[in-house]
Amino acid sequence: MPRRELKHPAQVEQWLVSWGQKLTKPGAMVLIGSGGLLWHAAQKGIETPLPENSMDVDPVTHDEEIVELCYEAHIGSPFEKENGWHINLMPDGALRELPPAWQERSSKQAYGLLTVEVPAPEDLLAPKLKRGEPRDLAHGQWARYNALIKL
Amino acid sequence: MTPLNFEDEARLQYSRILWKNPRTRRRLLHVWEHPEHPHRERFEENRELVVGFLECDDPQVYVDSVAGSEKWSLRTLTREIPCVIWSLWDESAGVAEVESSLKKS
C-alpha cells in the first residue's frame, strides 16, 4: 500500500462530505485530535500539510449509523487501503480531557445529514500539549504557523 | 473503582450502541459466535451476563447488581465483551443483509 496517511486539510473535508452523503438519517459526531485541527485548517483554506502525518481520525458519536460507518473504516479496512488512514472511534471520556466549556468555543458544520462539531484549535491542542510528545508539539507549532491559534 | 481506559470505554460505549439495532446486533453476534473467534467459548459461558450488560440502563449499577459482583468490576465485565475481529465484521455485512431479506420475505 502506498504511504499516504493523513496530512492535508482537504482530506478531512473530502471524508466528511462523503460520509454526509452516506447517512440515511441525521447524525452527529465530535471530531477531536489532529483530524479536528486539519478540519479547522480546511475551513481557512490552508493547504500546509501536517508536519507529522496522522494515521487516523478520532471521532466521538452516539449515533448507530455513524458507529457502523466507523467500524467499516477500521484499521486494515478497505477504507484504509483506499485512503491511507483509518477511523479510531473514541469514547465520551476523551471529551473530558478537553478544557472546561469547550462546547461554548466549538464550531459546527453540516455535511448533508451529518453534523460535525469540532472543538476550537486551542482546546484540541490542550491534551496534546499536556502529553508533550514531539509529534504533539509539532502539531502545536503547525497550528501556530498557520494562525489557527494565537502565538 | 478502577476507571476504564479509553480502549475499554470505547468498546463498552460502541458495543452498547450497536447492540440496540437488531441488524447491527446480528453483525456483532456473527463475529462473536464465529468458530474462528478466539473468545467464542468464553462469550458463550458469560453470554447472559454480557447481554445484560449491553442492554442495561446503567453499566455501573448493573455490575454492582449481578450475582457474584465481588468478582466483577466495570473493567473486568467490559473485557468480557468480545473484541471485533475485523475480517469477520466485514463478512458480517453480507450475512446481516441476507437475514434481513429473508425476514422481509
Image (spheres, grey):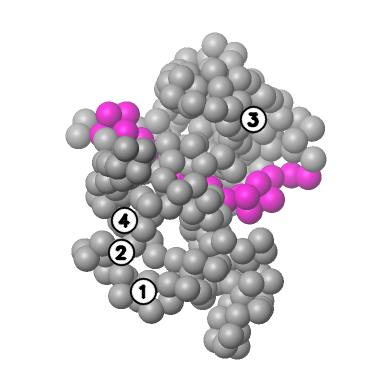
> Image check: B51 left or right of B65?
left
Q: Are marks 1 and 3 in contact (CB under 8 Å)?
A: no
**Disc 4 from disc 1: Cα separation:** 13 Å
Q: Percent from the top left, x then y, of residue A82?
A: 27, 29
Query: What residue type is disc 1 on?
Result: Glu
Q: Does mark 3 fall on the same chain as mark 1?
A: no
**Disc 3 from disc 4: Cα separation:** 33 Å
Q: Residues within 10 Å of mark 1 (few under 14, many from 20)?
A: few
Per the image, the residue denoted by label 2 is B33
Q: Residue at x 60, y 20 (%)?
A: A110
Residue A82 part of the magenta-drawn span: yes
**Disc 1 from disc 3: Cα separation:** 39 Å
Per the image, the residue denoted by label 4 is B30
**Disc 2 from disc 4: Cα separation:** 6 Å
Per the image, the residue denoted by label 3 is A117
Q: Does mark 4 fall on the same chain as mark 2?
A: yes
Q: Residues within 10 Å of mark 4 (few under 14, many from 20)?
A: many
Q: Residue at x 41, y 45 (%)?
A: B23
Query: What residue type is disc 3 on?
Result: Glu
Query: What residue type is disc 4 on?
Result: His
